Amino acid sequence: MKKQMAAVTLQPQYDRMTKLWTKAEESIASIGLPYQVTFPLDSSGECIAWAWAKGRWRVCHGKSSSDGNNWEFCPVLDSSVDVRLRLMPFFPDLKVKVLAAVDGAATNMNRHLDNFEQDLK
């Protein structure tokens, strides 16, 4: 009974959280950056990220592998309430980092395109 009461009582907050995270994801998607960007939460090996997950670029919760060389990403919208709440304060930092990465991405793409063009001559 208490579980049902909690679900009913908290449903408006769950819905609001989903709408806000959807808006957050759309705000970064509109930037159009097709590169992974991570922002560490702390020294725990977790991050908030702009990453490829489930067939598209998403705002994600990332966990590093035990060797620290690989990441496993789960879209924030598919994450637990606890994770969604914990990531909220880090979203502005991720967005700043994504915006900063746009210039670097253009430079990187141009370098690769120039090299490829030279190889085709």
Image: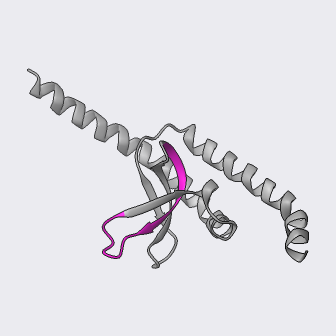
Picture residue at 59% right of the left edge, 64% below the top: 90
Vertical comparison of 72 with 42: above or below = above
Give coordinates of residue 106: x percent, y percent. 36, 37
Residue at the image point whose x is 89% and y is 76% from the top: 2
Query: Horizontal and vertical percent for residue 120?
Result: 11, 23
Q: Quadrant of residue 115?
A: top left
21 with respect to 113 (left or right): right
Magenta span: predominant SS is strand
Task: Give the residue at the far front of this rendering.
Answer: 1
Total residue callouts? 0
Extreme-bottom residue of the structure: 43
Question: Where is residue 71 shown, x and y percent of the image?
Answer: 39, 63
Q: Does residue 44 appear to the left or right of 118 in the view shown? A: right
Can you tell which quarter of the image residue 17 is in? bottom right
Residue shown at 47% from the left, 59% from the top: 73
Q: Quadrant of the N terminus?
A: bottom right
Classify residue 96 as left or right of residue 68.
right
- Whether residue 1 sits left or right of residue 20 in the image: it is right
Residue 77 part of the magenta segment: no
Q: Which residues are magenta?
A: 56-70
* Rendered position, 27 above or below 70: above
> Along the line of sight, which residue is nearer the eye, 3 or 15?
3
Quadrant for the C terminus, please. top left
Q: Residue at x 28, y 33 (%)?
A: 110
Q: How is the image coloured?
A: one colour
Instruction: In the displayed orientation, state which residue is furthest to the top.
Output: 121
Eyeballing the image, is 120 above or below 5? above
